[in-house]
Amino acid sequence: ARATIGLTGLATMGRNLARNIARHDHTIAVHNRTTRRTTDLVEEFGDEGDFVACESLADLVAAVERPRAIVVMVKAGEATDAVVDELVPLLDEGDIVVDAGNAHHRDTVRRQEKLEEHGLHFVGMGVSGGEEGALNGPSIMVGGSDHAYERLRPVVESIAAVVDDTPCCAHVGPGGAGHFVKMVHNGIEYADMQLIAESYDLLRSVLGLEPAAVADVFEEWNGGDLESFLIEMTADVLRHTDAETGKPFVDVVRDAAEQKGTGRWTVQDALDLGVPVTGIAEATFARSISGHTAQRSAARKVFATAPDGDRAEVDREVFVDQVRAALYASKVVAYAQGFDQIAAGAEEHEWDIDLGEVATIWRGGCIIRAQFLDRIREAYEQEPDLTTLLTTDYFADAVKDGVDAWREVVVAAVRSGVPVPTFSSSLAYFDALRRERLPAALIQALRDDFGAHTYERVDRDGTFHTQWAEPDRREVSVTD
Ligand code: 2AM
């Protein structure tokens, strides 16, 4: 055995991860169900490092130093289970199986429990940054035992993206913590992209700007607080022209957004945890609406004659800056909600996740990498048990400074008939949090009336029920 680590599943992500590992001077044993991919890899990129090509999983296992670390990069779901089942009898106590795909954290925990019975360690490793990141430095979120992390550490630290001399990887917690954090990361990515898309729509529809002009705006924004990979990429994509038609590329792409499901998982998980991630949920629903082609077409037919709303009369320069402020404030809300979900998940599953560390490792490698994450890191450094990111000095100032613009933008959008679900729901969330009294009081009263669900009072302790059907509507104290 001479390899530091083994990897099976050499489709694009697996192959790039393997090359990244080899390039960092770790001997890596590689395997794929179809051997062709293995030989292709070694033929094409063999000079990048030390690869040990293996024809079978047994060969792969035999090639790796003990305790072994075997990364599984096959198709998520049944294929992962099949490969893991095949690996188990080949491994010895203390060996580690790493799932570097996008698995659901509950599946990761299930696999962990299964392997534990065999004295084996199972790691759920979130890898963010797509194909490019896998090759040149992803953000890595590891969930599993201390034993497993210590074994993997030299490899993952060397292959991760680096920001300020700090590798963008961490042992975020035990169990499914790594895949959980990766899932929420993807959810936040949905929200971030939807906010960018709504900003683009506003600039185009309210101001009538061409895509190239919107690109200029995004490029300018990228020089300030909004600086991020996604904003930079947006400018680039909006400037791109379709070679065939000469039209702006964004106008030839079919407007039905797809999803692989991590946004949906995030929202489902948030509902279970009781965390209001309105930004992520609206972003996920917005993709869903875009894909309902038949309903869209039916609605267009029936409502074609309905007024579009008057395009709001706005000053171009003022409006551009208002959209910037609204985007930033909405983004603060979306991230605050995402971090709330991580905190709630950590508590629910007893994973003890360091939120500041999560912000730190998202600064490089991943799709949502941004300057902004440094502010989040600082906020959690100052106060690890933060109630909400929204009220920390830096973000509170950003929201206070931007709130007037935020309202103006939502009003302009509504008036112009431009859907901005994430802008407006983030504003509603902000307004709900800061409100002295919420109409939840009326909801509680109604619940007590139709279902005797009881209520609490503002003026004294206890649980009460009003006898609504009785003429005297007596209030009774309920104790159970
Ligand atoms: P293949 O090249 O032999 O198809 C993405 O599909 C990766 O997962 C590929 O490397 C693919 O191997 C692998 N894969 C998919 N299903 C698999 C299975 N049931 N067993 C092993 N590998 C699988």
Image (spheres, rainbow, N blue to C red):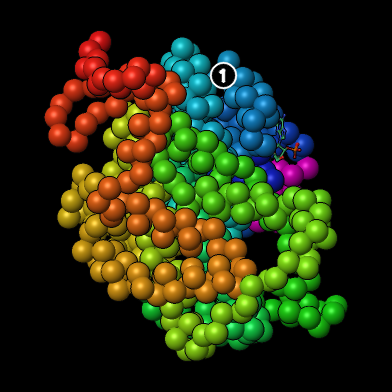
Residue positioned 36% across, 38% down in the render:
442
Residue 11 lies in the magenta stretch: no
Q: Position of residue 210 (x, y in %)?
A: 66, 84
Query: Which secondary structure type mostly characterizes the magenta part of the structure?
Result: helix
Q: Which residue is mark 1?
A: 88
**Which residue is more in the foreground, 347 or 353?**
347
Residue positioned 50% across, 89% down in the render:
315
Q: Answer left or right for 322 relative to 245.
A: left
Q: Position of residue 357 (x, y in %)?
A: 30, 50
Q: Position of residue 422 (x, y in %)?
A: 51, 58
Quarter of the image that includes the C terminus: top left
In the structure shown, which secondary structural element does the residue marked by tag 1 occupy? helix
Residue positioned 78% across, 71% down in the render:
252
Magenta residues span 36-46
Q: Residue furthest left?
A: 460
**Which residue is more in the foreground, 129 or 17?**
129
Q: Residue furthest right?
A: 244
Mark 1 closeness class: few <14, some 14–19, many ≥20 residues within 10 Å: some
**Which residue is more in the foreground, 128 or 231?**
231
Residue 148 shows in this picture: no
